[in-house]
Structure formats: structure tokens, C-alpha cells
Image (cartoon, rainbow, N blue to C red):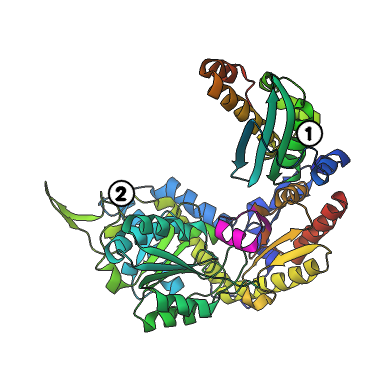
Amino acid sequence: MGKQLNQDLDVLRIREDFPILKRVLRGNRRLVYLDNAATTQKPLFVIDAISNYYKNYNSNIHRGVHQLAEEATLEYESTREKVRKFINARSQEEIIFTRNTTEAINLVAYSWGTKNIGRNDCILITEIEHHSNIVPWQMLAQEHNCKLEYVSVDESGYLNLGDYQELLNRNRVKLVSISQMSNVLGTIVPINKIIRIAHERGIPVLVDAAQSVPHMKVDVQEMDCEFMAFSAHKMLGPTGVGVLYVKKEILTGMHPFLGGGDMIKDVDKYHTYYNELPYKFEAGTPNIADVVGFGASIDYLNRIGMSAVRIHELGLIDYAMKRMRDIQGITIYGPLESSARGGVISFNLGDIHPHDLATIMDDRGIAIRSGHHCAQVLMRKLKVSATSRVSFYIYNTREEIDLFVQALYDARRLFKI
Amino acid sequence: MSDDIYREIILDHYRNPRNKGKLPGADISTHDSNPLCGDEIDIHMKIQGDRIMDIKFEGRGCAISQASASMLTEMVINKPLTSVKDIAKMDILENIGLTNLGPARVKCALLALKVMKLGMVNYFASKDPESAEILEKDSKSL
């Protein structure tokens, strides 16, 4: 892996790295993959890294003293260092591997939340949250008799910061947990400001970065959040690996999430001394192969450079929004300015239900998402039961957006709108 | 080509659903939803003797789920309630003219029938649990 390339992505060359993009579907339609907010495709470089682990140095980590165990441990731990560097954490001790973002948030709710949030305290989230940043807090609130409050989102898809201040004034807030980028509206929230306001009151902040870390430069020291969660599979990596970042001074005081092998220093009949950070939070044999694959995906993204990723997506968003706005009967949700969005556009077309639209798209080899996007609280706020959603990544092109827009015109014709 | 799905008849039932609305004094009212799609269907029936004298559905969702519900109400009105058990998956798909729907979309097409079968079984269960059990066993699976 060489140094960062220049700012313009060589998309055609990048596409060559993704075997799946050569797939032909539904007769003879070349796959147009526009469901990247759900999961991204994997370059051969990542697939090979996983396969190489199984072919050449498959072994359990941390315990064995044989050569394979050493190699596997080295690769596994080198991914931890790559993650640390990628988000600019101070120390590898602050990087915990989980299964996904959801598990990372649950870990915080269980290990930190149950000890620090009590009766009549308040957990503050927002109306744009994914179910993974709602349900764990509902469960905690029910068990600990504490409150769960939502910062509202306005009609343009922006968070209501006045509401945020007021909720902080009115409640004994013990945690602010917020998505940096909405998986439905694409809204990028003013995270630094939100964290600063919480910190003025001594309140820690969890950032759900599942949609942001894959698409833009994220720096946890600059942001100064206490917790951050994201998933490998949304950034070219394999499924089954997530990351939880926790500031060391907080992590030191946290109780383990799961008990078992590898998280211990010493076990006697009735007592266990836990392992040091971050191993205390990684019980049992982890997903070694996929963590290794995740390391390869970070290498791949670093080679491209995250600012180039963001610039490429901004170009696609701009182009797609411009073309979509010309279509009669379309409703686009979320901010109108491209700069306030990540590479996600949710919309509805006339009275066509999103599932019908997705079927029409699928017929043309175009994969889009339809439904509530695991954000039913937001759907109710938008007063819709579902939306269609396209989301972009480094391998998407304007030609693909043209095919998608053509299919929107086809759908209008089929439904006689 | 699934463009064929969105033929005149489906769009007609989607935009001008038959027997849609509330049914005050219904003997049977049943609800179900498809969590994957968010399709929702309520079916209300008035029963006289053994017959479905009146039927209405309420719902929201995709064209396939709503058009199938509309067509199903036309299929069963004035028929014996027990005849619902004999309606099979293929009867619905043939009736709406969509025999090669993918597995995800078949669920949309069958939601109304699922609700109707549930309503039938619950109705008999409140009167005669044993016969309801037999009905449920006899009922063509979806």
C-alpha cells in the first residue's frame, strides 16, 4: 500500500478491484449497487486477506506460542493499531472489537450505563437514531426507571439545537447518545458543537459513527467524544466486526461485558482478576479472520484517502439530487444542501410504495433499499411508513445514477403518474 | 420482467380498492402486518349463518399487498366462511396474475389471506374450540 493518491478517485480502476461489480443480474443487467448504507461491497484485497489467513496462518490468538499463533496475533493486533490510527485514538487500549455497532452500543449500555444511570436520570438521544441507538437505551430506561428523551428533527432534516439545550436544562442527563450521520436523511449533525455543549455540563457523549466513519475523516481526539461505535462491513470490510472506542479514563472504570476466556488475568474458584485493556472487553475467541480482513479494508481506504472519498460522494450527491429534483411527483427527505449530507438520499415517488419501486429497480439490476431503514421513530416523524433510499460509495458513478434516474422515469410511466 | 407486475388490474385495485373501509358491527376483525415491508391489513367480516355477508379491509402498503386484499374480498363475499380454509397460495397468485413473484414479494401478496384465515380460526375458536382446531389443521398452508 503506497501513499495517498491525489484527490480525484480513479473510479474505473477502483471498480476493477470489486469482483461483484461484474455480476450480471435479471437477464443481462450489470449490477448497479446503491445500497451502501446497508453494507458495502468488498474489494478482492479484503477477500484475499481473509482467505490468506485461513490458508496460511489460521490459529487462535494471544495464547499459543507456536509460529501460527504468533502470526495470527500479530495480524489481529495490527488491525487494532490501524483502527487507532484511522480514528486518531490516543492508545490501542481504547479500541475494542465487537460484532458490530449494535453490540458496541449494547456494551456501553450494559457495562457503563447500568452503573452510571439511575432512577430519574435521563438518557438523551435524537429522532434520527437507528434502532440500534434506541432499543438498548429503552431497555436500560425500563430496568433502571430512568427517562429517555429525544432531540427533535425539523422538517428539513436538521436537529433542533434549541430543543437540545432545553432538554439538557430540564433533565438530569447522564449520557447523550447520537448518530453523527443519519442513515435515512443523510444529515450530518454538528457533532463538535453537540459534544461541547454536553461537556459544558460534564455529560459524556456516545457517537454512533456507523454511517460517518466509512465516508469521512473522523478524529476522536478532535471530537473529544467519550464513546464511538462503528462497523467494518460498511467500510469495505467483512460482516461480523465492529469497533467500540472508549476514552481510556472511562474504560478503566468500566466492568466487563462478557465473561470468559481471554478477558482474564487469573481465575480461581470464586474470583477472577480481569485482563488489562482492551482484552478485558473481548471475551472468547474473537472473529480473527474478519478482523484481519478489516485491517485490509482500512489499508485500502487509506490508500484512497478519506478526503477523496468524501469529495467523490459529494459529487455524486450533488448530481443525483439535481437530476432527481427534476422528476415530477418526487419527495426528497432531508437537507437540500449537499454539503450537509452524507452519501444517502431517501425519497418517495408519487403514490408508488417503496417496495414496488425497489422491485422495478431490481428488474433493472439496480439494488436500492426500501422500508423503514430501522428508523421507525423517524418514519413516524416524517409521517410515512417507508421510504426508498439510495446510498453511494467509492465505486459508484454518474452513469449508474443516470440508470437509476431512468428507472425512476420508467416507474412513473408504469404507475401512470 | 417484473414490470409485468404493475399491469392495469393491479394498479386499478391499488388505486380503486374494492370493499375498503370500516365495517361497524363486524363479527370478525383481524389485523396483521409484514414487519419486513411495513404492509398492514385489517379484515372485517359480518357473518350470517355460515356466510360472509359483508367484508371490508383497511390497510396500507405496497401495490401488491393492497391489490391482493381488494381482490380477495371480492373472492369470498357471499361465500361460506369455512371456504376460506380452501384458498391456497396459488389461488391468490393466479387470481392476481402473479405466479412468479420472488419470495420477499410473495409475502406481500399473501398477507390479506393470512389475516383472513386467522380471523376465521379465531371466530370458530370463540364458539367451538375443537372445530377451530380442525379448521386450522385442514386449512391450506401459505
Q: Position of residue A306 (x, y in %)?
A: 56, 73
In this orientation, which residue lies closer to the viewer: B40 or B6?
B40
Quadrant that contains the C terminus of chain B: top right
- The chain containing the residue under callout 1 comes to B
Q: Which residues are magenta?
A: A371-388
In this orientation, which residue lies closer to the viewer: A331 or A244?
A331
Q: Is residue B141 left or right of residue B17?
A: left
User: Tag 2: Cα neighbours inside 10 Å, few (<14), some, or many (≥20)?
Assistant: few
Q: Which residue is at a point 41% across and 79% down the rendered structure image?
A: A169
In this orientation, which residue lies closer to the viewer: A286 or A254?
A254
The quarter of the displayed image where residue A41 is located: bottom right
* Residues behind callouts 2 and 1 on a single chain: no
Residue A233, label in figure: none
* Position of A341 relative to A392 (above/below): below
Q: Which residue is at a point 81% across and 62% down the rendered structure image?
A: A329
Q: Residue A382, can we see it?
A: yes
Inspect the image, locate mark 2, and give the three-letter code of the amino acid beneath it: Gly
User: Tag 1: Cα neighbours inside 10 Å, few (<14), some, or many (≥20)?
Assistant: many
Q: Which residue is at a point 38% across and 84% down the rendered structure image?
A: A200
Q: Position of residue A394 (x, y in %)?
A: 64, 65
Q: SS at mark 1?
A: helix
Q: Position of residue A184 (x, y in %)?
A: 61, 62
Residue denoted by label 2: A284
Q: SS at mark 2?
A: loop
- Measure the alpha-carbon separation of dots 2 and 1: 54 Å
Mark 2 or mark 1, which is nearer to you?
1
Q: Residue A107, can we see it?
A: no
In this orientation, which residue lies closer to the viewer: A366 or B115?
B115
Residue denoted by label 1: B71
Q: Is residue A374 left or right of residue A414?
A: left
Inspect the image, locate mark 1, and give the three-letter code of the amino acid beneath it: Met
Q: Is residue B32 left or right of residue A367?
A: left
